[in-house]
Amino acid sequence: MKVVTRFSHSIPKLTCPGGSDGILISTRNLNRVVSLDMKTMRITVESGMNLKDLIQAASKANLALPYVPYWWGLTIGGLLSTGAHGSSLWGKGSAVHEYVTGMRLVTPAPAAQHYTAIRVLEIDDADLDAAKVSLGVLGVISQVTLQLQPMFKRSLTYSTRNDSDLAEQVVIFGLRHEFADIAWYPGHNRVMYRLDDRVPVNVSGDGVYDFIGFRPTPSAATLANRLEEESSEARRDADAKCLASELNNLAFSLAHYGLTNNGLLFTGYPVIGYQNKMQASGSCAFGPEESRRLSCPWDPRIKATFLHQTAVSIPLNRVKEFILDVQKLRNLNPKAFCGFDIYNGILMRYVKASSAYLGKPFDMLDFDITYYRNYNPNTPRLNEDFIEELEQMALFKYNGLPHWGKNRNLAFNSVIRKYANSQYFLKVKEQYDPDGLFSSEWSDKILGLAGSVIVLKERCALEGLCVCSEDLHCAPDKGYFCRPGKIYRDARVCSYIRN
């Protein structure tokens, strides 16, 4: 059994029930505010409530959830289960689960208990550290209590600079600004810093951040962009990708990324606005479901944008050397990185260490990398080897941790060994669901309970199902052969070799 909503944004198979006889349990109608205590500033909501409605409910009481993901088309149960986060090294950090003070779960039970147990976890309950990032394998989250804060405003300015000193600046920048993040465009040697800080509510400004990439997009335009990228791939035309990324970034810049100073117009930086209007957006998730004319760019109904998303967190004390390594790789062929820049670059977000058993064990910087995926899994992509080397470098050389709701199979190979407290999580899992009713083949594999996520077969490396060890894992008939990495020599990547 798996608990899902209409969003179901997990990229790997985390939300898929096992086999062909699984059951999906919907929380779509679990969308109410149960209670809001003004004295303690705590809100209790049902797990199917989406982030947009949660933010609005808190703001009506002049309260705010301090850190959330930027995309509000998520449910509170789903975003907690995958460890979703915003960006901050301040306070308790940017992971939403750090603000959970209580939770109710429905778990399996013997017949004498009518097969159902309701577990109520409070802030001092050790099991809460398992439930806060549960991967959906403990049972059904029914209610969540979150600690809010008094409403505040934010002051946001974007500053674009050359990336030559990025490695030296990255940690300092995260400590200096509460809501700092960085968008890195390695193909163009450019980086955009988000100078974003809390300010008192009496500071003038009524800004709104309605991010351009999360607005309804004309489906025809999305399809045209996809066709152009497919053509660039087929022609092996890296120059076209670099031009497309430059035009895309220019368009976002001219639209000020969706920022307005008053909800209508952008008049200049800084943009100052209330937290509930600045922290997240995603209007394309809430349009008419029958519409095909306007949609989210990745809407599967229009079969346009199709992506891989590698999201890996690197320990903060190793981020400098990782960035320097990526720059060395980039400098060998800058055009190979324009494929990242098309999708608004590499987004870098700060995350603090967590007490959650499957949360971040250290202060880390998350690198969110989005890139082209072919609808035919047997077709290699342009500059495949550079993409794979960066991915393997992050995961293996720098011991990065994958986001539970993103990434390709290889990122989860033996991942549970990277969590020192995983045995405590598995003990709670055994106690709450001893028969594994809420588990699946996928969850058992990533938790190290059965088999491996690696699938060895012809061309498996193209989709990240394996790391190549033989040429047949690439596409030798199309000129792609398994070779060592260029900077990280332990990497094994599919390199294009002309005859």
Image (cartoon, helix red, strand yellow):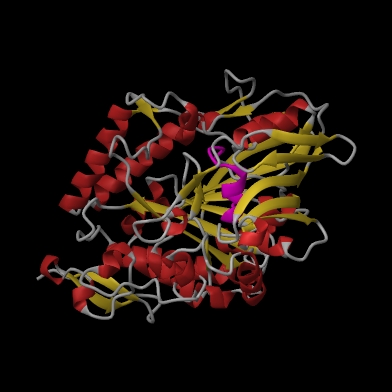
Q: Is residue 72 magenta?
A: yes
Residue 475 vertical position relative to residue 407 in the rendered view, above or below? below
Residue depicted at 46% across the width and 36% down the height: 213
Q: Quadrant of residue 301?
A: top left
> Does residue 179 appear in this view?
no
Q: Quadrant of residue 385?
A: bottom left
Residue depicted at 41% across the width and 27% down the height: 289
Q: Is residue 76 magenta?
A: yes
287 vs 247, nearest the viewer: 287
Residue depicted at 22% across the width and 39% down the height: 227
Q: Quadrant of residue 72?
A: top right
Residue 208: percent from left, percent from top: 62, 27
Residue 44 vertical position relative to residue 260 in the rendered view, above or below? below
> Does residue 25 appear in this view?
yes
Position of 39 with respect to 269 (left or right) is: right
Q: What is the span of residues highlighted in magenta in the rendered image? A: 71-84
Image quarter in which the C terminus is found: bottom left
375 vs 494, nearest the viewer: 375
Residue 422: percent from left, percent from top: 62, 74
127 vs 355, nearest the viewer: 127
The residue furthest right is 39
